[in-house]
Image (tube, rainbow, N blue to C red):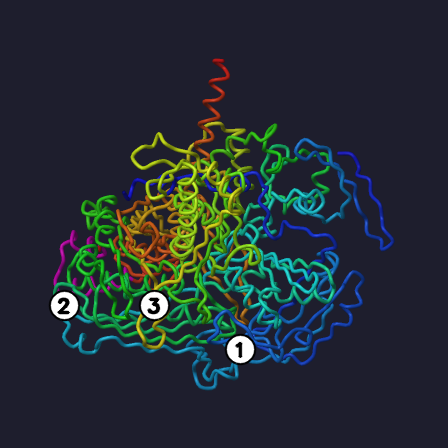
Amino acid sequence: MTTMQAITDQNGVKRYMVNLVVNGDHRTVVVKANTLLVNVLRDHLDLTGTKKGCELGDCGSCTVLLNGKPVNSCLVLAVEADGQEIVTIEGLVQQGDTLDPLQEAFIDHAAVQCGYCTPGMILSAKALLAKNPSPTEQEVREAIAGNLCRCTGYVNVVKAVMVAAKRLQEGRGADHEG
Amino acid sequence: MRDNYAVIGKSVPKIDGRVKVTGQAKYTGDLKFPNMLVGKILTSPHPHARILHIDTTEAERLPGVKAVITHKDVPPLKYGISPARWDENIFCIDKVRFVGDKVAAVAAVDDETVYKALKLIKVDYEVLPAVFDPIEAMAEGAPQIHDEYPRNINTEIHQHFGDVEKAFAQAYHVRTDRFVGQRTYQSPIEPHSAISMWEGGKLTVYTSTQSPHYFQYYIARQFGLPMGDVRVVKTFVGGGFGGKLEPTGLEFAGAVLSRLTGRPVKMFYDRHEMFAHNRGRHRQIMEITSGVDRDGKILGVHANFIMDGGAYTSLGIATAYYAGAMLTLTYDFANYKFDMIRVYTNLPACGAQRGHGAPQPRYAFECHLDMVAQDLGIDPLEMRLRNARKPNTITPNQFKINSCELEECIQQARRLSGWDAKKGKLPRGRGIGIAVGSFVSGAGYPIYRTNLPHAAAIIKVHEDGSAATLYTGATDIGQGSDTVLCQMAAEAMGFVYERMKIVAADTETTPHDFGAYASRQTLMSGAAVKQAGEEVKKQLLAMAGEMMQVAPEELDCREGVIFVKGRPEVNITFGEAAREFFVRKGPLIGRGAYTPPTLGGTFRGAAVGTSPAYSFAAQISEVEVDEETGEIQVKEVWDVHDCGTVINPALLHGQVHGALYMGMGESVWEEVLFDASGRILNPNLAEYRLPTALDMPKITSALVDSFEPAGPWGVKEVGEGATIPTMGCYANAIYDAMGIRVYSLPLTYEKVWRALREKRNADFSQNRQMAEAVPATPDEAARGDGR
């Protein structure tokens, strides 16, 4: 990792220049050593799709993908993310307004109620399907066990992830044949 | 005709589904306004202390701090969501009453400065003795929490219908049991927040609320403003479950800070502060006595309860009444006595949580009923069938029941779960249990006394006829009321859901509605929406009649097409007629309002529990208990609901899943715990133990056919009903599995383990006595600890 550039203000507080790739865009922010990634995303970059529910790593509302891995962005320092690739919920919509199959499945299967856990839930599921395209129901439950939902009892969330996995598999099959 | 609907009864996708899955939906904490400040509230570190002096000078001097306020800067008027007992101040004046009580607030340029400033406020306290248990709080000489309430009694209820003593005297069997509930917390995933701004003499508050109306009413009252000068706007809300029904303090403090600074102020609670502010479920101590005849028919019931209210009233007066009032709904008995004392303690105030007051008493009653059935040798399911309420009956406390398919709910749950094949036949360690429940479809009377309609709606058809917008004060907090009400609007107008837009829960742009609580919106807001839709349709058909030269009575409109009845090929579109209407007559508007009929008796407290309609449910669960560890695994749950006509099946089942989830958490894991000085030990979601996806059993949610005459299209409630039977249902399944009864919530592994150990010891000593009296065969001795 390259050494980050730092500047010190008149009170002696040091700030670091952090370079991130967020949803494919190169972004630069200047932060203190203790600034959390979740606050950079929400406050500096206005990516408020990443939610804050506890700031303790319990609820998973702030889940983002850091180099493809789901992380609680309230437990990641912004400086730790320097040079890394981050995907937030805003990065999931493909060209135009095509939704990710997970997003489609969440809508189709009533997996969204208040919607506050939804971005984190979808990103955890996204990471799961990237490494395990045909998970069992138990594997889905394990993958989203760090994302708390107070509305759905997880019933339709699990169903939606299973359906999205199936659709993706079928889509891949069709691509091969096509 | 009932199933010939075009829009309702279909699982259309949620109207806000797309914005929620893409992260576009903005919750209050996501909003930013130019020049906005950040505000926070300083709270008490002591459970009970006199405030001697507050020094804010150092905090005020900190660069970046724009305002620091205490009780001296705010109106001294007491408030509270229950007008019966206004007992809170925006900031404490003379003393603090729980750890977390509100003392002062700061507005500053950023979070970091705010937190620093809070630490610089110096408060001198004289610490007073505190009391945390309701029974101790009622004792002579206990610390006095509010001067106006001797022995810390917040409210006392004594109701008697029929003659319970006589019923007990005539009964074949009388039994008393005592149960204890726990403090739980709603724990919405989105913490409370509010953004307040004064502009041109008008206060606007963006907030995470279940009721813009009550917020507006209480904020206006607190600051002596006409309601028209207070605008409350609901943003997307990340779950409420009762906790976001009343102002949180953030709105009051933010309003003052904004007025002083002339800038928008965003206030928020972190997760710990959420637990400290609380307003979650009351812990109840519940003694239930009932008398039954030889066949298990209930003759009379006496419910004798005490509840820990915490330091303030919140919605607790209603909670106290609900706790007893709702026990009469499910079973038909004529004699009922209800005694309740709600007691102040030096703990966070309790309020309304999903199922408002009813779930813990229901747990107690359903356990008790199982034990009565056991005493009589009657199957628990059969016991419930023998007593189940019938349609078109009146409860002893004067609630009028119209539709009621409880018997069919029980029968269907019996079939789905395979009860007859399982009850008493499962291997040791496995058990099956049943419980039932019922809930209101909206409260018959509002929280404060007013003759305003309970709900109102306006529908505006767009000038070109391409869409219609529903304006409603109804409040979508995730349950899907925006979607369901748009379906209803489209159905009533003869329009299509896909072309519906909605503006909701903004006190300035939408007509009055009391909001999301007491499971009221599908029935009450729905009734107003239906009326508004029908008014649009009537005007549209008149216009189409002119255009088509046909009498309007001969026309109908369905899915956006106006046609001659019996000759559907003669038609014009909804859009064409709507556009022509605008050209000739101006805006095409429909209006609706709903006021429930006069309900209930005339005794004290008769209003609480009244409703135009009641839902009913039966739940059966199958559990597995690990004999070594006490671990409970719920294998499967079947919920069968009577909720009238269904508007959106997918959303409805989602409500059942969520209600059951909350009931399950409260059954086994969830509990707010305190140390000896009233500080919360587990103010976070992990240690509070919110269940994860791995903790949930297989859930089957089923419905019975039902039609409620008091509801639009026959609807009634679902959102809270499924929370009510769950705790009792699990407790009964655990009993069936192991022959042990856990008399307090939550039914933790440890309690189960201890009960198992006690039972083993008891069985062991009993066996030894028997062995000493009559020598047993080895086989019989081995079976001795069985059920």
Is residue A171 among the parts visible in the rendering? yes
Q: How much space separates mark 2 and mark 1, taking CA atoms?
A: 46 Å
Task: Report which residue position mark 3 lands on.
Answer: B598
What is the magenta segment's predominant secondary structure?
helix
The disc, 3 or 2, on the residue closer to the chain's N-terminal end is 2
Task: Left or right? Give the position of B516 relative to A43.
Answer: left
The reply to whether residue A138 is visible in this rendering is no
Residue sitting farthest toward the right: A10
In terms of secondary structure, where does tag 1 sit?
A: loop
Disc 3 with disc 2 on a shared chain: yes
Tell me: B502 left or right of B160: right
Q: Amino acid at mark 3?
A: Thr
Sequence-wise, which precedes: disc 2 or disc 1? 1
Label 2 residue SS: loop
Mark 3 touches mark 1? (CB < 8 Å): no
Q: Which residue is mark 2?
A: B293
Give x and y (percent) for residue B203.
65, 63
Q: CA distance from mark 3 to mark 2?
A: 35 Å
Closer to us: A110 or A152: A110
Say whether residue B780 is magenta. yes
Residue extent of the magenta highlight? B759-786
Which of the chains bears the disc numbered 1? Answer: B
Callouts 3 and 2 close, C-beta under 8 Å: no
Residue B180 falls left or right of residue B591: left
Question: Which of pointers 3 and 1 lies earlier in the amino acid sequence?
Answer: 1
Residue with the mark numbered 1: B130
